[in-house]
Image (cartoon, helix red, strand yellow):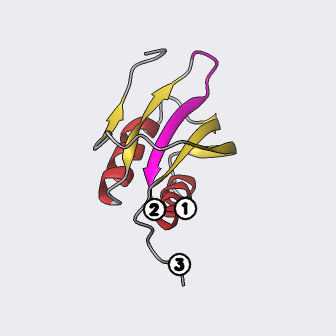
Amino acid sequence: METRSVNPTRWHMLFEGEVQFVGFRYTARVIARRLSLSGWVKNLPDGRVEAEVQGPVVDLRRFLLQMKSQPHIRITHCSVTPIPPDPAERRFAVRGVME
């Protein structure tokens, strides 16, 4: 059984597939907020979606699994890179393209 860490982890993610024009960013926000994760998500001009998500590893994994299980979203590839956490960040936001 996984335990929650007091120290948050932050993942930089790039999603590929049918991830734009399907409500991806807003679904990500709903799931992230439900899991009490912080970070952001935005569309990229090349058709991918970029996100940085922060929280306990167990919840980051839940976020990714829940995103992959959405019937209206088809993720064909997702790269995950651990990056340093942002201790000041408190919410999850949807950003505009190239913001």
Q: Residues under labels 2 and 3: Cα distance?
A: 10 Å
Q: Which residue is mark 3?
A: 2
Query: What label sits on residue 61 in the rendered view?
Result: 1
The local secondary structure at tag 1 comes to helix
- Please report the bounds of the magenta region as a residue range: 45-56
Query: Which one is in front, 88 or 91?
Result: 88
Circle 1 packing at 10 Å, graded few (<14), some (14-19), many (20+), is few
Which amino acid, by three-letter code, is at mark 1? Arg
Which amino acid, by three-letter code, is at mark 3? Glu
Give the number of callouts. 3
- Marks 2 and 3 close (CB-CB < 8 Å): no
| Disc nearer the start of the sequence (2/3) | 3
Q: x, y percentage for residue 67?
A: 51, 52
**On the rendered structure, is 78 left or right of 21?**
right
When the figure is inspected, residue 56 is found, relative to residue 23, above or below; the finding is: below
Query: What label sits on residue 56 in the rendered view?
Result: 2
Residue lying at 51% horizontally and 36% vertically, measured from the top left = 51
Q: x, y percentage for residue 65?
A: 55, 60
- Marks 1 and 2 close (CB-CB < 8 Å): no
The local secondary structure at tag 2 comes to loop
